[in-house]
Image (cartoon, helix red, strand yellow):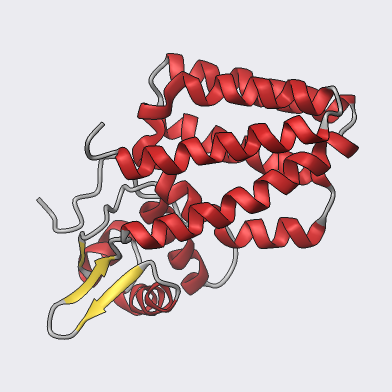
Amino acid sequence: MLSTGLPQGAVPRLERPGPLRERVYEALLELITTRALRPGQHLVESELAGHLGVSRQPVREALQRLNTEGWVDLRPAQGAFVHEPTEEEADQLLTVRTLLEAEAARLAAAHADSAGVAALKELCAEGEQAVAAEDVDRAVALNAAFHSKVMELAGNTVLAGLAAQVDRRVRWYYTPVARQRGSQSWVEHRELIAAIDARDEQRATHLMREHTEHTRRSYHERETA
């Protein structure tokens, strides 16, 4: 087995236009955030280049950038490894996420229109279907889409910009607990939609805070669950 150990079909295609180094970076980051490349996994330049159908140079550049951003650890005489987040790192980021998303929920309750609420309901229905089908990857993607929609409905570009900075790392932390959270996560989404639809800012804030706190606790309990 290759050191990279990529699941069949996990490697994204590099067909989008743009600089090659950027496309390789995005491909590797997606593999990391979806945990196709798992924390602690050894990343071999030549093998990654072979998977992606590129030379080693853009892979090396991407790994250096990912190291700067904290996704990859470059160890002298050993090579590159997917970063293994500490419990403290995860706790700090998920705490910040709670603050941002609770405010987004409040603003969404204040500003969302019927079309926005309908979009949330549609995403929720798709998420419930994904959970029922045990399609964890799709459930994770739809969970991210749901929270992004709430942020969009909040109508605050500064808040959205701050959330975007942590969004991918939130997905990284959410993936290993998605099955554990299962349908309960979408039950909580339904309750949140009802509060937003009722324009109940206080309840929307409370529900989002509780919802993201449940995810934070699930992450810390994942090894003993």
At 77% across and 25% down in the image, what residue appears?
Answer: 195
213 or 11, which is in the foreground? 213
At 74% across and 33% down in the image, what residue appears?
Answer: 204
Q: Is residue 176 above or below residue 87?
A: above
Q: Left or right: where does residue 8 sit relative to residue 175?
A: left
Locate residue 222, reporting x and y percent.
Answer: 29, 38
Locate residue 63, reporting x and y percent.
Answer: 35, 74
At 45% across and 44% down in the image, what residue appears?
Answer: 216
At 82% across and 43% down in the image, what residue appears?
Answer: 107
Q: Left or right: where does residue 61 sit relative to residue 51?
A: right
Q: Is residue 155 above or below residue 166?
A: above
In the picture, residue 4 is in which quadrant?
bottom left
Locate residue 13, reporting x and y percent.
Answer: 44, 51
207 or 131, which is in the foreground? 207
Q: Is residue 40 above or below residue 106?
A: below
Residue found at the very far left of the displayed protein: 1
* Residue 10 visible in the current orientation: yes
Quadrant of the rendering where the C terminus is positioned: top left
Q: Left or right: where does residue 166 sit relative to residue 12?
A: right
